[in-house]
Image (cartoon, rainbow, N blue to C red):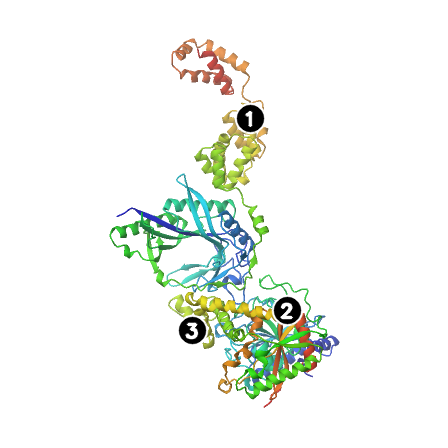
Amino acid sequence: MKKQTVVIGIEMHCELKSNSKVFSTAKNGYSVIPNENIQALDMAFPGTMPMVNMKCVRDALKMSMILNCKQPEYMYFDRKNYYYPDLPKGYQITQSTCPVGVHGSIEIICDGKPVKVDIADIHLEEDTASLDHLDNMSLLDYNRCGVPLLELVTEPCLHSADEVMAFLEHIRSIYQYCDISDADTKKGQIRCDINVSIMDEDSKELGTKVEVKGVDFSGVRGTIEAEIKRQIALKEAGRYDEVEQETRRWDEETQSTIRMRSKVDAIDYKYFIEPNIPKFRITKRLLDDIRQEIPVLAYERRQKYLNEYHLDEENTNIIIKDIKMANYFEECIKIGLDVKTTANWLNGIITSYLYREDITINDFYLKPEYLKQIIDAMNEGAISSKQAKEIFSKSLEERKEPKNYISNDNKQVSDEKVIEDIIDNILSQNEDNIRAYQNGKTNMFDFFVGQVMKETKGKANPIITKELLHKKIDK
Amino acid sequence: MNYMHKSIEEIHDALKKGEVTSEELVKESLQNAHEVQDKYNAFVTIIDAAQGGEVNDYLLSGIPYAAKDLYSTSGVLTTGSSNTLRDYVPFFDATAIVNLHKNGAIDIGKTVCDEFGMGAYGNTGHTGSVLNPWDPTRSCRGSSAGSACAVASGVVPYALGTDTGDSIRHPAAYCGIVGYKPTYGMISRFGVLPYASSLDHCGVLTRSVKDAAIVVDAMKGIDPKDMTSWDSSKIHLYESITGNVKDKKLCYIKELCDINNYKNPSEELKKHLKNFHDVLEKIKSLGIIIREESIEKYLLDAISSVYNVIAYSEATSNLSNMTGIVFGPRSEGKTYTEMMKNFRTKNFSPLIKRRFIIGSYVLQKENKERYFINAQKARRLIVNRWNELFAKYDAVILPVGTGPAKYLDMSKNISDESLIPLEEHLQVGNFGGFPSITIPDGFIDELPVGLNITGKCYDDENVLNIAYAIENILGYQNQIAKEVK
């Protein structure tokens, strides 16, 4: 069999962050108590009407701009009509005629290589209620009903599970950077419909498209890999005609996809423009206003850290994950801290502290200028790295600026004259060892450093000590 | 003394002077309601517990009214005259109701309509047909049949209606009263059971133009709960009625009003159109200029089909929430599909089901372009054509329907396709969201007939003022129905 090219298109649904739902004033928030965050509209009581949440519209337009999509002249919505118990109105308010964005594209990095992903459209819509199926009954929880969703539809332009995951992570990061969504995969805020097909490598004709619907973020990779394997196996066995244009679902337990229905039975959603939401103009002013709110995104920061700051890949990737972390980092660099040192502090002691305290960097007491007090003192030799860590903890514990703990008492001995005297004294008592060192026993150097430290109770500036020692014994 | 037969201004004066109390008015109104219910079946609910209220400077304070059963009333049964909602008690008021209650108005009943406002004869409601108080063998016309009946028979001075095709303005003509639907969005539709959202209007049935102005002044206002509502705070309908209409310009449409356009016209139609032209002559004496205009026949012929396609499409979607799951008497079934299907099959009337099927059909992928999209385009063409008239005229004046009230026994009515444009032209007011008012303009064989005045959007003050002047010269204001046979 010829080598197969995999073609994947993704529909990524992400729950948006907002105070209220997209068309009602009920709270948009997770609740363990069913049917707590609801208004009459969310249960489709007769006579209720949608009210558009402008925060959601702005966020949707923002995302449209980030994805380099074309924004429409007017904002309006459509009804997607179908009957299902989780859809109380009997239709979903969505956008099909005129989505907030069409024909976009974005570059992502996969395996260190840039990949261009084409965006078919992005549109704002409402989520459905959630159903809980018990043995002899089903329970309905309308908390989720009307929660704002952004659905992003790619062209069939992805070719592997790796590319899809890189794409999803990239988009997740944008959502989080812009505070449009927490994009919390553990809370199921991201769900995907995945279209997979295979074709001969040299073919120009796409194979039969199979759709796997409603896949949780955690199931995406498994779904794609299983579906590719299934389709290739059928093709190898000469049974490719059994790959049908159909809708399947991902089964976590068996790690396989299971047939739901044929595309022939596809529902006709009878779309038409939502008459209860008058169309409104999307002005250039509104777009400019929204554009200003877009922060520098992870992808751009990554380039900057690698190329301008010359920070290594590993540290870069950790820092850009969280915009708050990245902002803190950049603030540090701005006030003159060293890139590598800051990265080490940030990804080491600071991260573990934040983790332990379960807080974010925004709630971290040591603002960049406080951190600078510690690092500067260390660089000046006023404190040792061990002392720096002690001051770090103390400052956080007592909520006092680090400079309060940097006194002359525990100051490093940096006076060359003082260190030289001590070195001379030690050397005069160790003539055999000097000879051994000079004859090639190089690890003897550390012995001398150790002796100086012992004499100064660790306060001698190690750099000066080493310099002087080299000067005196390197013959 | 029957205060409920008087105008709102007169009742207000009597209340202010202490001639009567609000409590007495409510009592009188409730008693009238029961009598009219026995005779004509106008009410789904008569609120016997209704009580008098405070009388203040608001013209509507302390005065009873009735609302079409499509208006949600908190704590009061609201059925939409449908079996699907036969037990439904809303926990919120429609915004229009809230606004009326801020004015001190007192709701004494919910009136029968065609199921969810769908129907032309007031005979599809789940509690039976509404009979015409002028002749109980005839229809009040739909869908605001009960409201028209209650006002015409003097139960209340005004009753709320809704108008998707002509559901306020046509019953008004059949019952010899005034029916006014203001510009689309002037009154919030929040809490009003929908039929077809892009065509649905709230409005009122009264016995005089002034009363209509007073009531709509109280009902209207921008509402955050209805995004199609708009700020009309600068519009004061009642205050702007001066009666000064000199040099106002009206037109009528030749193709609808010229008897020579109808093959084998009935005597009734002849009388109706002759009456209309006689009335036009009287109106000219007010200094109003009236001209004849011509409208392309294909546009007039399209009106009724455009209405059917758009209204039924929106209706099938709007009423998809009727599944019996969240509200309404839930049906049994092994699966959710069965539950929904049983509920809808059992509870909707055949007329509504027919409309749902047409609505679904024209929205189907393979039919949408041909029917639904084309209907939208035709709607736009018709509205544009009417707006061309409004560029030259203050309003269009036309006869309502083809004559007086039709028989409830449909076999007795003449059906003639060439009459459809004349029968249905008021739907244009819904296509364009135009302010539109029907007033009585005479009698044919002792039964009332009406004329309609429709103006351009937001020009409600002008439309009402013209209607008021014409009403004055014709003298049919405050008329109470009396059975003629």
Q: Residue A70's x, y, as percent? A: 50, 51
Q: Residue A146's x, y, as percent? A: 50, 58
Residue under label 3: B345
Q: Which mark is residue B391?
A: 2
Amino acid type at image mark 2: Ala
Pointer 1 indicates a residue of which chain? A
Amino acid type at image mark 3: Thr
Pointer 3 indicates a residue of which chain? B
Residue under label 1: A377
Q: Residue furthest left?
A: A237
Q: Are marks 3 and 1 in contact (CB under 8 Å)?
A: no
The N terminus of chain B, quarter of image:
bottom right
Q: Residue B54's x, y, as percent? A: 69, 71
**Which picture quadrant has residue B140?**
bottom right
From mark 3 to mark 1, how far is it between C-alphas? 82 Å
Assign a secondary structure to mark 1. Answer: helix
Circle nearer the viewer, 1 or 2: 2
Q: Are marks 3 and 1 on the same chain?
A: no
Evaluate whether residue B479 shows in this view.
Answer: no
Q: Residue A59's x, y, as percent? A: 53, 51
Given residues A184 and B143, the one toward you in this image is: B143
